[in-house]
């Protein structure tokens, strides 16, 4: 299964467009994803108790598991903490798109990202939608272009795609995401949009996304802050015309699940690789935990630790912070049974340091990719989490975010 750099218009029947409507000065700031036919829809939203207006709207229109046909995304304003007017504007945005495309408002999902508490400029949104609807067309290069229109503090476009064969038919999956700061597990702070021409039951698609989220988007952390706007959406329009997947336990279901997992894992890792101010990527692999939940908690606790993050940023081989992070997790961890390695070098075993490797460790912490492996020797459950270092630049970016 080969991953390639195409966007959400890679699968059959999906079109995209983007434009600058004046929300930002220098680049596209609003984008549209459209399926030529109604598509099955699966969603996962933020677990923050403060939910942006688009989250409320999308949750309402997906509660009946009905098919969707479009997604509209704007930057600059998160449309969060904006009261009744914010909700009305989210609904109005869907109406503008549905009127332009000949759809119903409840067939249009709305997503926003940007500053909390800032109302949408609906005059600009309306003008932008007019252009988006007019310009939407079959051009695979638009998927890459549109992925840039959803970015905030991101420095890189985040796209990925793949093609598999199911029941003799070519099935494609394409995706794009944004995310750089306010990244924390429990639906990491981000927007992620995935499209596929696979024919699959909605309940099976939702089951797949729920499971995959646990080990991809919920296992990344830049700064430990959870957003009000986190959204992951998968649309499946069935135009590949494969035999419908009605179970993840079938051969076709397993193949699709594996492909979708690889897509979402790639997006998650691309987000971490573009963490605000980050200079190093931290991967924590936990093996032999008592159970799966413990494995996830242990791995996340390391990548979420500010002390670990700052030590790695400074190239300080302070392995004690890693051990401490593992021990402070809400999970079973016995230092007397654990073996910890950094980039393959053992640094802690059976409750004590392996001092002979300190010189090698000092050099390894100068690398841009740091892999921490914790062998717990308590059970058979494993998990991986991804994070990044915490730098001076992160503070600068967020200290000046609104200015």
Image (tube, rainbow, N blue to C red):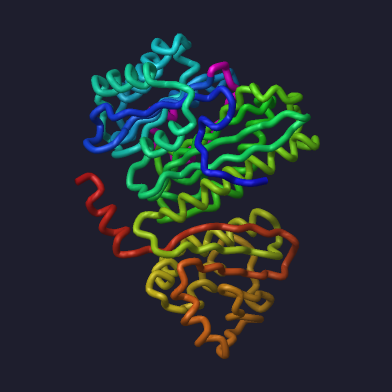
Give the camera-side residue of 394 and 58. 394
Does the magenta-highlighted stretch encompass residue 319?
no
**Residue farthest toward the left in the current orientation of the protein:** 403
Number of numbered callouts drawn: 0
**Residue farthest toward the bottom in the current orientation of the protein:** 356
Position of 370 with respect to 255 (left or right) is: left
Q: Indicate the position of residue 191 as horizontal and vertical percent values.
A: 45, 38
Q: Indicate the position of residue 383 as horizontal and vertical percent values.
A: 64, 57
Rendered residue at 40%/18% (across/down) = 94
Does the magenta-highlighted stretch encompass residue 54?
yes
Quadrant of res 105: top left
Quadrant of res 289: bottom right
Q: Indicate the position of residue 364 as horizontal and vertical percent values.
A: 50, 77
Give the camera-side residue of 365 and 106. 365
Q: Is residue 346 above or below residue 194?
A: below
Rendered residue at 73%/39% (across/down) = 255
Residue 165 appears anywhere in the view: yes
Q: Indicate the position of residue 40 as horizontal and vertical percent values.
A: 61, 23
Q: Is residue 223 above or below residue 169?
A: below
Q: Is residue 377 above or below residue 53?
A: below
Give the camera-side residue of 84 and 314. 314
Q: Is residue 303 above or below residue 207?
A: below
Position of 92 with respect to 67 (left or right) is: left
Position of 216 with respect to 279 (left or right) is: right
Task: Tell me which segment is drawn in magenta.
Answer: 36-56
Rendered residue at 71%/62% (across/down) = 290
Residue 91 appears anywhere in the view: no
Rendered residue at 27%/27% (across/down) = 21
Give the camera-side residue of 54 and 25. 25
């Amino acid at each position: 299964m080969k991953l390639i750099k195409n966007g959400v218009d890679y699968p059959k029947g999906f079109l995209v467009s983007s434009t600058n409507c004046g929300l930002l000065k220098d680049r596209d700031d609003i984008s549209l994803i459209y399926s030529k036919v109604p598509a099955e829809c699966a969603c996962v939203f933020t677990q923050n108790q403060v939910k942006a207006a688009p989250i409320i709207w999308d949750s309402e229109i997906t509660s009946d598991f009905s098919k969707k046909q479009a997604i509209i995304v704007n930057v600059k304003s998160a449309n969060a903490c904006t009261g009744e007017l914010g909700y009305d504007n989210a609904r109005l945005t869907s109406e503008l798109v549905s009127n332009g495309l000949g759809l119903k408002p409840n067939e249009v999902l709305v997503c926003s990202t940007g500053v909390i508490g800032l109302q949408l400029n609906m005059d600009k949104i309306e003008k932008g939608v007019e252009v988006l609807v007019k310009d939407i067309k079959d051009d695979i290069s638009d998927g890459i272009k549109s992925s840039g229109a959803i970015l905030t503090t991101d420095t890189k476009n985040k796209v990925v795609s793949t093609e598999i064969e199911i029941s003799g038919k070519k099935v494609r999956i394409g995706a794009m995401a944004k995310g750089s700061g306010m990244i924390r597990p429990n639906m990491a702070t981000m927007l992620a949009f995935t499209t596929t021409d696979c024919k699959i039951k909605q309940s099976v698609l939702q089951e797949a996304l729920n499971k995959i989220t646990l080990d991809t988007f919920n296992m990344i952390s830049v700064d430990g802050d959870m957003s009000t706007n986190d959204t992951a959406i998968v649309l499946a329009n069935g135009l590949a015309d494969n035999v419908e997947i009605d179970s993840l336990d079938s051969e076709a279901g397993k193949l699709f699940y594996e492909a979708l997992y690889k897509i979402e894992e790639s997006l998650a890792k691309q987000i971490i690789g573009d963490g605000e101010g980050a200079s190093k990527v931290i991967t924590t692999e936990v093996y032999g935990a008592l159970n799966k939940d413990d494995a996830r908690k242990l791995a996340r606790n390391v990548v979420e630790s500010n002390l670990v993050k700052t030590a790695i940023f400074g190239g300080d081989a302070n392995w004690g912070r890693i051990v401490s992070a593992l021990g402070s997790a809400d999970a079973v961890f016995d230092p007397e049974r654990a073996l910890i390695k950094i980039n393959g070098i053992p640094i802690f075993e059976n409750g004590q340091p392996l001092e002979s490797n300190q010189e090698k460790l000092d050099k390894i912490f100068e690398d841009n990719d740091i892999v921490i492996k914790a062998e717990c020797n308590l059970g058979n459950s494993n998990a991986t989490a991804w994070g990044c270092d915490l730098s001076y630049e992160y503070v600068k970016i967020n200290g000046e975010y609104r200015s």
